[in-house]
Amino acid sequence: MTTSAVDPELLLRGGLAFEVDGPRATVTLARPEVLNAQTPLTWEALRAIGESLPDEVRVVVVRGEGRAFSAGLDKRFFAAQEVDGLPGIAGIAALSDDDADATIAGFQSGFSWLRHPARVTVAAVQGHAIGGGFQLALACDLRVVADDVQFCMAETSLGIVPDLGGTYPLVHAVGYARAVEICLTGRRVGAQEAVASGLALRSVPVGELDAAVDELVTGLVSAPAKAAAETLGLLAGVADGADPADALAAERAAQLRRLRSLAAGEG
C-alpha cells in the first residue's frame, strides 16, 4: 500500500482519506460525525486525487465512513458567503457570470474525473446519499449499495438544482420520466428500487458491503489491463451517444491496436 501524493492538509480539510493499494485506490469520506457532509474543500480534494492517480490504478472505490455515505452539502454552505475560504451559495450569487461559472465548473471537476474511461469507479453506498452525496455516487461507473441505502436528490426541493454532474448519469440510469419524478419530489429511493431501476448494480446487507465491493474489485481487475482499458473506452463511447456505425468503427480500431500490441509482445 502506498501513501497519497495529495497534500495531507488538503485531504484533512476536505474531510477525505485516500490510499492506493496496487491497482486499487480508495477514497473515503471521513467526516462521520456530520454524516460525511461535503464542502467546497471536499470537491477541491477530490479533484486533487483525480489529478494524482498513478497510472497503475485500475479501480477507484469511493466510500463513506460510519453510518452514511454522505448527507450532502454541509449546512454552512447554504448560509455563508464563504466556507473554509471558498465561496458559499451567497458568495457564488454575488460573483460575475463568468466567475460564478468558473467556480461551479471547478466544483464539478471534483466529480467528473470519476467517469474517465481510464479506470472503473465503484461507489460503496450505505445509509444516506443525499444531494451531493447522491451525485457523488452517480459520478461513479458502478454502485453497490447496502440494504439501508436512501438516495435522495434534495436540491430542487431546497430551491436550487443538482449542479455537480448528477443529471446526466441519473437520466441515463433510470430514464427521463423517473429522473424528473425523483428530482422534483425529493423522495427517498431505497435499495430494492435502486437495483430494479438501474441506479445500483446490487444490494447487500450493511455488514457485507465491504466484502461485496472487494469481490467486485477483484473481478474488475482480472482482465488484462490494456484490453480492459480499450473495452472501457468502447463502452464509454456508446454511453456518450456514439451511433452504431461509429461504435463499430471504434471496435475495429481498438481491436487492431490490441492485435498489434499482442503481436509485438506488449501484452
Image (cartoon, helix red, strand yellow):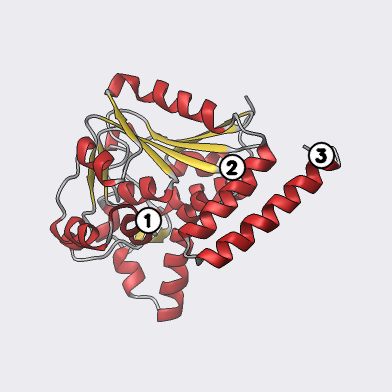
Q: Is residue 35 left or right of residue 46?
A: left
Q: Is residue 168 above or below residue 5?
A: below
- Between 33 and 209, the one lying in front of the other is 209
Q: Residue at x 57, y 54 (%)?
A: 234
- Between 239 and 16, the one lying in front of the other is 239
* Front of the two marks 1 and 3: 3
Discs 3, 2 touching: Cβ within 8 Å: no
N-terminal of the pair, mark 3 or mark 2, is: 2
Residue beneath disc 1 = 169
Q: Is residue 25 above or below residue 87?
A: above
N-terminal of the pair, mark 1 or mark 3, is: 1
Q: Is residue 220 above or below residue 82?
A: above
Q: Is residue 96 left or right of residue 44?
A: left
Q: Residue at x 38, y 48 (%)?
A: 136
Q: Quadrant of residue 90?
A: bottom left
Element carrying mark 1: helix
Q: Residue at x 36, y 69 (%)?
A: 92
Element carrying mark 3: loop
Which percent across, then down, holds residue 13? Answer: 45, 43
Task: Residue type at mark 1: give it.
Answer: Pro
Which percent across, then down, holds residue 240? Answer: 48, 62
Q: Residues within 10 Å of mark 1 (few under 14, many from 20)?
A: many
Residue beneath disc 2 = 7
Q: Residues within 10 Å of mark 2 (few under 14, many from 20)?
A: few
Separation of disc 1 and disc 3 at Cα? Answer: 35 Å
Task: Residue type at mark 2: give it.
Answer: Asp
Q: Which mark is residue 266?
A: 3
Separation of disc 3 and disc 2 at Cα? Answer: 35 Å
- From where the camera sits, is residue 116 visible? no
Q: Residues within 10 Å of mark 3 (few under 14, many from 20)?
A: few
Task: Residue type at mark 3: give it.
Answer: Glu
- From where the camera sits, is residue 218 visible? yes
